[in-house]
Image: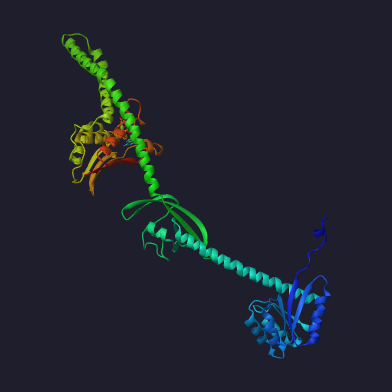
Amino acid sequence: MSAESSQAPPAPRFRLLLIEDSAIAASIVQGHLDAVPWQRAELAHAETLAAGLARVKEGWDVVLLDLSLPDGEGLEVVERIRDVDAHVPIVVLTGHDDVRLAERVLGASVQDYLVKRSLDADALWRAIRYAVSRQQLVTQLARTMAEARENEANLHQLIARSADGVIVLDPGGAVLFANPAAEALLGEGRLVAGRGCPVALPAGETSLELGGHTVFIDVRWVDVDWQGRPSRMALLRDVTGRRRAEELRLRLERTERLAAVGQLAAGVAHEINNPLAYVVANLELLAREIRRLSSQGAATEHLAQPLDDARHGAARVMHIVRDLGVFARSEANEAIGPTDVNAVIEGALNIVHAQIKHRARVVRELAPVSRVGGAEGRLTQVFVNLLINAAQSIREGRVADNLVEVRTRQQGREVVAEVVDSGCGVAEEHMPRLFEPFFTTKRAGEGTGLGLAICRSIVESCGGSIGISSKAGVGTCVRVRLPV
Ligand SMILES: Nc1ncnc2c1ncn2[C@@H]1O[C@H](COP(=O)(O)OP(=O)(O)OP(=O)(O)O)[C@@H](O)[C@H]1O
Ligand SMILES: [Mg+2]
């Protein structure tokens, strides 16, 4: 056992000031203080209020105060001491007659009172200890509150300067606070204290149309206590830049992929073209020969169907090779407009008429629109592909129940054309892949998966854009935007 731990630490020595005119009472107090050997006190004695007031500021742990002094009486005595020191703990010593008065001064200004005649050492020490510890508590509380106020002020400053937008709403959705970043994000003057938030802010990444621009905002919600009230705080981060960079990256990736596919396609198309030319020419030769033999009475009926199949197959291969060629073809020799989109659509509708007529009614809503930049032939290919897709999404037979609608309208410096169908729609998991070259859900032989990739390539080469919205089982809308 070490030397330190075998001894109890010395009890703190209390510094007490007794303001009391009676010498007997003073010596009784001293006696009680000395009666408890493990408690230590240093007692100073003032016989008048004036003498007491002169010493109050010396830093006492407790002032023991008689309420009837030669130069002061009752409540006034307490008040005069408080004028000099607002915080020092006071324990009042009182005669029997003054008990009611003592009770009145209890509370904020006086910690405790003791009746002199029934005073004993235990009661005196207990009152001293309680007065001191209560004072410590009060000091601690005051310090903690000051710190809390400072922390709150710091927090407010941090929030005000934060680059992220901060909006605090009460449980009813009214704005309690918005920092400058939030106002800059949502528009000056739109966030008004006491009113609702002007825009819905669902958690997660959300896009807002603000002043004609699309802004992407990442929204987080947290429950907070705001000035003592349960509230909700939205943290808003402008992620428009990040989103645009991401879009640009995807676009570049797609362009690279398309370029690679284009090269491959050009090679394949070139390789196939020549042998295909012999196949087609020789099939035509065979057809003529068979017709000649037949006219001479030879039995050729059994050859008609296989020959037809072969010609059909060859035509389809030619079609695919031509589509593949689109990726690699230069536009150098092609006219680039101005082209009348409505006329292009009419032309495309004529081409696909046979494929649509057994499946759906065709509705046109073609508004007068400006001419656009873009070769007529290539734009026709776009609408042929879109109309064939629309037709293929609808089963044959129920013409009256189904619709392929083509609309055009002018929107600022753009012509917007939409091909809408009431077909099978696109499964959600396929949506991101629709424009990928060779992505198809059609059976082998029915689709190569190049239609939409070609459409996008053509539309983007005209400076436009193409997008699809679709709901499985309901239908699809393909929207093409072309600059005038
Ligand atoms: N209007 C539409 N309705 C439903 N699904 C569609 C529609 N348009 C496109 N799709 C889906 O997108 C896929 C890709 O279309 P895309 O035109 O690129 O290729 P494809 O039609 O399959 O083949 P290709 O056009 O080369 O003959 C289709 O297989 C189909 O799943
Ligand atoms: Mg297609």
| Up-down relation of residue 418 to residue 274 (above or below) | below
Which quadrant does the N terminus fall into?
Answer: bottom right
Please report the residue visible at 32 percent of the width from the left and 52 percent of the height from the top.
213
In-image side of 25 versus 181 (left or right): right
Ligand 2: quadrant of the figure: top left
Count of labels shown? 0
The front one of 359 and 370 is 370
The front one of 77 and 336 is 77
Q: How is the image coloured?
A: rainbow
Which quadrant does the C terminus fall into?
Answer: top left
Whether residue 449 can be seen here: no
Residue 34 in the image: state x and y as whole percent.
Answer: 82, 76
Q: Which quadrant would residue 429 be assigned to in this image?
A: top left
Q: Which quadrant would residue 332 be assigned to in this image?
A: top left
The front one of 252 and 292 is 252
Please report the residue visible at 22 percent of the width from the left and 14 percent of the height from the top.
282
Please report the residue visible at 31 percent of the width from the left and 29 percent of the height from the top.
262
Residue 183 in the image: state x and y as whole percent.
Answer: 39, 60
In-image side of 6 versus 366 (left or right): right
Residue lying at the far bottom of the rendered structure: 70
| Up-down relation of residue 331 to residue 406 (above or below) | above
Residue 350 in the image: state x and y as whole percent.
Answer: 20, 34
Residue 74 in the image: state x and y as whole percent.
Answer: 68, 87
Whether residue 365 can be seen here: yes
In-image side of 59 versus 352 (left or right): right
